[in-house]
Image (spheres, helix red, strand yellow):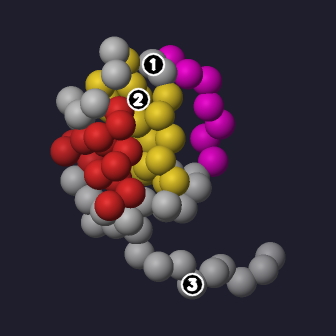
């Protein structure tokens, strides 16, 4: 196995603060706070479970963030 990269710290962010925001505002705020990848998903979307460092995920319904998680 190769060496583990020396990655910078992920944003120290309160993920609950995104819940209720509209999708565009949530994405803008996430990028301002240092997230490199922002992914919006509909409820029940089938996704793989790999962890992508620096990514924040939003579950979006009716253009509002319902849930948020890292990776």
Residue 54: % across, % down: 49, 61
Residue 37: % across, % down: 51, 54
Q: Which residues are magenta?
A: 44-50
The question of residue 17 being in magenta is answered with no
Q: What residue do we see at 61% from left, 41% from top?
A: 49
Kindly state the secondary structure of the residue where label 3 is placed.
loop
**Magenta stretch prevailing secondary structure:** loop
Residue on which disc 1 sits = 43
Residue 21: % across, % down: 23, 34
16 displayed left or right of 52: left
Q: What residue do we see at 34% from left, 49% from top?
A: 28
Residue 34 is drawn in which quadrant? bottom left
Q: CA distance from mark 2 to mark 3?
A: 30 Å
Give whichever of discs 3 and 1 has the lower sequence position.
Answer: 3
Give whichever of discs 2 and 1 has the lower sequence position.
Answer: 1
Kindly state the secondary structure of the residue where label 2 is placed.
strand
Residue on which disc 2 sits = 59
> Front-most of 30 and 7?
30
Q: Are marks 2 and 1 in contact (CB under 8 Å)?
A: yes
Kindly state the secondary structure of the residue where label 1 is placed.
loop
Compared with 51, 20 (above or below) is above
3 displayed left or right of 58: right
The question of residue 49 being in magenta is answered with yes
Give whichever of discs 2 and 3 has the lower sequence position.
Answer: 3
Q: What residue do we see at 31% from left, 42% from top?
A: 26
Q: What residue do we see at 35% from left, 37% from top?
A: 24
Residue on which disc 3 sits = 6
Label 3: few (<14), some (14–19) or many (≥20) C-alpha neighbours in 10 Å: few
Q: CA distance from mark 2 to mark 1?
A: 6 Å
């Amino acid at each position: 196995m190769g060496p583990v990269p020396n990655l910078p710290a992920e944003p120290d962010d309160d993920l609950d603060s995104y819940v209720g925001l509209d999708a565009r505002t949530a994405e803008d705020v996430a990028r301002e706070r240092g997230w490199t990848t922002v992914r919006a998903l509909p409820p029940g979307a089938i996704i793989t479970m790999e962890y992508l460092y620096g990514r924040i995920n939003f579950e979006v319904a009716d253009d509002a963030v319902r849930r948020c998680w890292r990776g």
